[in-house]
Amino acid sequence: VNDVRIGVIGAGVMGNIHAANIAARVDGARAVAVADPHAQHVEECAKRHRIDTVYPGATEMLAAEDLDAVVLCSPGDTHGELIEATAIRGVHIFCEKPLERDLARAKAALEAVEKAGVKMMVGFNRRYDPSVRAAVDAAHSGRIGAPLTMHVIARDPVWGSKKKPPGDLFLDTTIHDLDLASWAMADEVEWVSAIGGVAGSRIDDPDWALTTLRFVGGAVATIDNNRLSAHGYDQRLEIAGTGGVVTTDNERLHLASIRDAEGRHYARPQPFFSERYAASYVDEMRAFVRCIRDGGAPEPDGRDGLRALVLAFAAIRSYEEGRPVRPAEITL
Ligand SMILES: NC(=O)c1ccc[n+]([C@@H]2O[C@H](COP(=O)([O-])OP(=O)(O)OC[C@H]3O[C@@H](n4cnc5c(N)ncnc54)[C@H](O)[C@@H]3O)[C@@H](O)[C@H]2O)c1
């Protein structure tokens, strides 16, 4: 079987992470082209990962190359249009989260994917993190009995003053945890409630929030997000069931600890996502390539991407209106 021929769209942080993994750690695939209007980004990405051809845009790349798949790493508000342009050519898609930032475009993109019969996987990489996966396996297998409550702590290091579109915390950060909680609890959400505020110095949009999900079957999940974590990237979760509890801890810079008169001291957590979730980016790309080569369904897929997007909009509305919001209220 020939290598899966991949075109990378967007040569920023995630484009480079995926291109590096495809080049060195994912068997059966090759990045043959990269597209990005940012000339320096696209040239550097191609050089770094030995990609043959560069394009100023996805349209040019899709027209000129015989691709099996694209890895879509441009900003979220470009995804819908690019998914449609890709699907129509019969090319499979790995789409970074969020699926879109606009609900109408997300739905149109999903329809295009389903109509074309191509595969689309969405980059909720936490599903491929070994610790997260082990915890969710414990919930799914009955090892901790029936899951009752889940607590996700996902705090980013200080983001600083970079201007972000409204609702960015929910659409960009919480969205990972909305997918994670839906997957772990294996149930649909009845309502979403979000409270939070602005605690950083130079942004006017929430930079911390506590989001609660009530599931149809009665279970509850809380998601504690902020972009203000002084001690680094704080990523933990706990699921409590009728027969036990499963907990994950942060991965640290190193595992040495010092005991002294004050107690025991550990190194801080890994700095941010590219370090903490390095293994998950490799594994999700292997899974994507495998589902193209061997058949099988991508996981998570476009439906999961849309579900998480609807939940993120419900969280935003709840935050704004100060009341629980049902996903069904989020319509076009
Ligand atoms: N899964 C994760 O852990 C994770 C982490 C960070 C970002 N992301 C997601 O990955 C995506 C990219 O984020 P990033 O941090 O790499 O951003 P980035 O700003 O580093 O890179 C984005 C790149 O896309 C290019 N671009 C803009 N419009 C384009 C277009 N129409 N066609 C092609 N390229 C275009 C930009 O020039 C830039 O080089 C976003 O959807 C983001 O939410 C996911």
Image: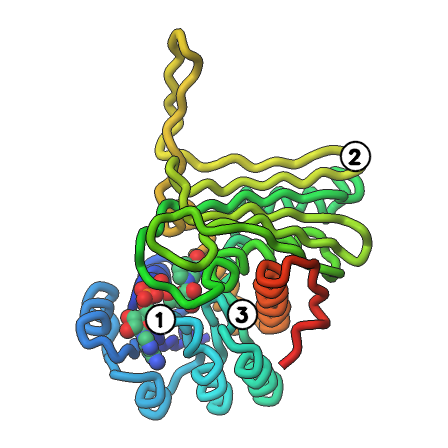
Identified at 58% across, 41% down, the residue is: 237
Name which residue type carries label 2: Gly
**Which residue is pictured at 79% across the width and 40% down the height?**
145
Q: Of helix, strand and loop, which one carries label 1?
A: strand
* Contact (Cβ within 8 Å) of mark 1 with mark 2: no
Q: Is residue 261 visible?
A: yes
Comparing 245 with 69, the one in front is 245
The mark nearer the N terminus, 1 or 2, is 1
x and y percentages locating residue 153 in the rendered image? 54, 43
Assign a secondary structure to mark 3: strand
| Pick the front one: 8 or 267 | 267
Which callout, 3 or 2, points at the residue further toward the start of the chain?
A: 3
Which residue is drawn at the image coordinates 25% and 65% (left, top)?
49
Q: Which residue is mark 2?
A: 243
Note whether 254 is above or below 155 in the view shown.
Answer: above
Residue that numbered label 1 is attached to: 30
